[in-house]
Amino acid sequence: MVHLLSLAFFCCAVVVAGGGVVASSSSSSSLSVSSSLRLLSTTPLQNDSSAPRAHVVYGANTDVGKTLLTAGLCRHSSLHLGLPTLYVKPVQAGVPYDEDTVRRYGCKSRLEARTLHRFDEYPCSPHLASELSGVFLSDGEVCGSVEEVVGDRNQGEETVTYVETAGGVLSPSTTGLGRGPEGEGFDGEDPPMRSDGERHYTTQARAYSSLGLPSILVGDSKLGGVSVTLCSLEALKSRGWRVDAVVFVGGNRKDPMMQNHETVEAYLKSRGDDLGTKVFSLPEPPPPTGDGDLLAYFDEGGGRKGLEDITAWLRRDRE
C-alpha cells in the first residue's frame, strides 16, 4: 500500500491485542509503544539442518504479487504437503489484512497466520503510518517480535515459515534505528533523530537482516521490471542476504512477448550466480472475481506446478 494520504495528525493510543500492536485514533495524548515487547537480542534464526525452514519474502516493488505468492506457498505446504505452516506479517499498514488472504486459502488445521504490528487507520507505507500515528517501533522491536513468534512456533515439529515484508526491498522500516550497524536502538519513547533534527530511517533490507534468514524476492513483471528486479537483488546480496529464489508472478499484460524472468535468469547465468539463486515464473493469475478462480490457480496447471517447483527448491537441503 503506497498511497500517500493527506491526513491531519491524529493522536494515538496503543492497544495490544492478539499478539499485535494496533494503532487507533484517540483524542487522548499520544502513547508510546509498550516496552513490554520482548527483544530477543542477537541469535539469528539460521537455516542449518536443525533450524526452522523459514524465508523472508521481499518484493522488487509494491503490487508485484508478494501476498499472492505467499498465500500460494502457504496453501501448498499446509494442504498439499501437510506441514505445519506459519505466516508472519511483521508490520501491516491499513486494511484489509494480508493475513486474511493467506488464511483464506490455507489449510486451517495446519496454518497459523499472524500480524504482529498494525496501523489500521493509515493505508500507506509503514514509515509514514508510524509517523502519522505517533507510534514509533524500532527495528529491534519488530525483529524481536518476529523472532519470538517464529522461535516459539518451531520448538517441535518442523514448521514452514514465511515472513512477508511491505513494499520494496529498500522501502523504509517503521523508524529505522535498531540493531545493526546503522543504529544503536532506542527505547521507544521518542522517534530517532539525526543530529540535524531529521528522522533517521533504515531500509527493510537492513531492518530484517538480524533475523539471519534466507529470502525470496518477488520480481517485477512490468515494463522496466528487469532493472528494478536486478537492483533489488543486488541490494539484498550487498547487505548479506542469501536469496534462494526470484519469482515472477504473471507476465506483462501489455506485451506478452516480454518475459522478464527469462532476461533475469540469463543475466544470473552469465555471472555464474544461478546456482544459489533460482528464477521461477508463475502464470498470470485470474482477475480477483472470486475465491474459486484463485483456488484453481493454486491447485491446477501451471500455478500448481510452479508452487511445487518453488517449494522443492526451497526444501532442497531437507529432502
Image (cartoon, rainbow, N blue to C red):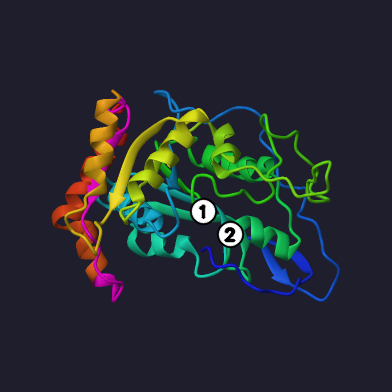
**Amino acid at circle 2:** Ser
Is label 1 in a helix, a strand or a loop? loop
Q: Specify which label sits upstream in the sequence, 1 or 2.
A: 2
Residue 69: assigned label: none
**On the image, numbered disc 1 is attached to which residue?**
166
**Badge 1 density bin: few <14, some 14–19, many ≥20, Cα 10 Å:** many
Picture residue at 30% right of the left edge, 25% below the top: 271
Q: Are marks 1 and 2 in contact (CB under 8 Å)?
A: yes
Picture residue at 32% right of the left edge, 56% below the top: 223
**Badge 2 density bin: few <14, some 14–19, many ≥20, Cα 10 Å:** many
In the rendering, at what x and y percent does residue 54 appear? 43, 38
**On the image, numbered disc 2 is attached to which residue?**
125
Is label 2 in a helix, a strand or a loop? loop
In this view of the protein, which residue sits in the foreground, 313 or 51? 313
In the rendering, at what x and y percent does residue 318 appear? 31, 28
Q: Which residues are magenta?
A: 273-292
Q: Main secondary structure of the magenta part?
A: loop
In this view of the protein, which residue sits in the foreground, 274 or 12? 274
Specify whether residue 173 is in view. Answer: yes
